[in-house]
Image (cartoon, rainbow, N blue to C red):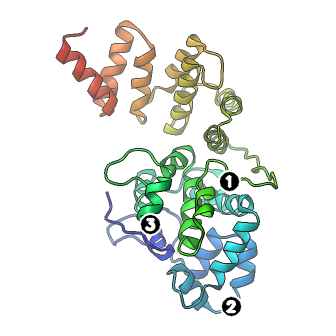
């Protein structure tokens, strides 16, 4: 894992856009960015209109959480208190465009983006209470939930938290990291057209607790794709649908359909897809899928196969 220690927005920008000489940036396609670029790429347009024409020192102080001038932070906090969903959705859309330019292929390294985001520093007591990032080998966190659903949703929340955390009330940070940051305005997210964007929207819908609605979104994407997975994102979609059908989560239990989606999911780019197929298949097919998952270093498959060999199970 990269040795990042991210306390401020400036630390985050260095980690994501300014690598060492031998490294590719975590987010590609954005070279020679200056302070104004970072601000415009990530923050709400109304905030940009108010501050981009002012002294550049304002941006430097804001990015470094410098107490000498908190004007931008105060303005952002006011907007977040008034309508958190509007601010989160605005920053989220900008993060989507940054990670998937024009809704096309991803322009980021998924593994290294996770490492960078999980390197943010959160006050110990706050993290212990809200479990925002993973620490000390613990698995599971609000950050991971959002990242697995949609990396741009996770990035948006990290950006906003680093921007205001030192002055924000704990209640606001808690709301920011809830599954659904919508407030009484009821403003809904913009519908996206690409399958990848629809998958991310479905995962966020699932994360909000609307499992049946999420399955409906996934079904529409699956019909649109119309065949076996061709990349890891599609494979993860079919895996989630298969497990939902096999467990009756958001849809009535349907083992035949579950196995069909898990068969479509099988792809070496996603070793877990072979393992999940093995769990719901039978006989030699299940064994072959489990062995393939283990060959691809799927930890769950390695454990299960090791236990089977140790216990003498066929």
Q: Position of residue 265 (x, y in %)?
A: 50, 26
- Residue at the spot 58% in from the left edge and 55% down from the top edge: 177
Q: Nearer the viewer, mark 2 or mark 3?
A: 3
Can residue 98 be seen from the camera position used here?
no
Which residue lies under the disc numbered 3? Answer: 123
Corner quadrant of residue 97: bottom right
Q: Position of residue 205 (x, y in %)?
A: 67, 40
Which residue lies under the disc numbered 1? Answer: 181
Which residue lies under the disc numbered 2? Answer: 54
Q: Secondary structure at mark 3?
A: loop
Viewer-nearest residue: 267 or 212: 212
Query: Upstream in the sequence, badge 2 or badge 3?
Result: 2
Q: Position of residue 288 (x, y in %)?
A: 33, 16
Left or right of residue 29, residue 176 in this image:
right
Q: Position of residue 246 (x, y in %)?
A: 54, 18
Q: Nearer the viewer, mark 3 or mark 1?
A: 3
Q: CA distance from mark 2 to mark 1?
A: 31 Å
* Labels 2 and 3 touching (C-beta < 8 A): no
Query: Upstream in the sequence, badge 3 or badge 1?
Result: 3
Left or right of residue 180, residue 272 in this image:
left
Dot 3: few (<14), some (14–19), or many (≥20) neighbours within 10 Å? Answer: few
Corner quadrant of residue 153: bottom right
In the image, residue 16 sits, relative to residue 1, either above or below, namely below
In the image, residue 192 sits, relative to residue 16, either above or below, namely above
């Amino acid at each position: 894992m990269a040795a990042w220690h991210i306390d401020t927005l400036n630390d985050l920008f260095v980690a994501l856009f300014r690598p060492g000489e031998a490294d590719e940036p975590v987010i590609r396609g954005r070279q020679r960015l200056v302070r104004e670029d970072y601000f415009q790429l990530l923050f709400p347009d109304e905030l940009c209109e108010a501050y981009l024409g002012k002294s550049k020192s304002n941006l430097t102080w804001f990015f470094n959480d410098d107490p000498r001038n908190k004007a931008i932070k105060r303005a952002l906090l006011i907007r977040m208190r008034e309508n958190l969903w509007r601010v989160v959705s605005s920053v989220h859309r900008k993060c989507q465009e940054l990670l998937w330019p024009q809704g096309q292929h991803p322009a980021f390294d998924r593994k290294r983006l996770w490492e960078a985001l999980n390197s943010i520093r959160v006050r110990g007591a706050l993290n212990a209470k809200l479990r925002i990032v993973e620490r000390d080998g613990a698995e599971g966190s609000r950050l991971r939930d959002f990242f697995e659903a949609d990396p741009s949703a996770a990035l948006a929340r990290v950006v906003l938290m680093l921007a205001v955390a030192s002055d924000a009330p704990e209640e606001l940070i808690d709301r920011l990291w809830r599954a659904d940051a919508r407030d009484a305005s009821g403003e809904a997210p913009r519908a996206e057209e690409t399958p990848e964007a629809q998958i991310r929207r479905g995962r966020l819908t699932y994360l909000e607790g609307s499992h049946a609605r999420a399955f409906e979104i996934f079904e529409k994407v699956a019909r649109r794709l119309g065949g076996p997975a061709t990349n890891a994102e599609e494979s993860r979609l079919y895996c989630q649908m298969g497990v939902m059908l096999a467990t009756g989560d958001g849809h009535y239990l349907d083992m035949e359909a579950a196995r069909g989606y898990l068969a479509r999911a099988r792809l070496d780019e996603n070793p877990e897809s072979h393992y999940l197929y093995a769990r719901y298949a039978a006989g030699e097919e299940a064994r072959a899928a489990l062995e393939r998952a283990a060959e691809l270093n799927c930890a769950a498959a390695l454990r299960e196969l090791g236990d089977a060999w140790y216990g003498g199970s066929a």
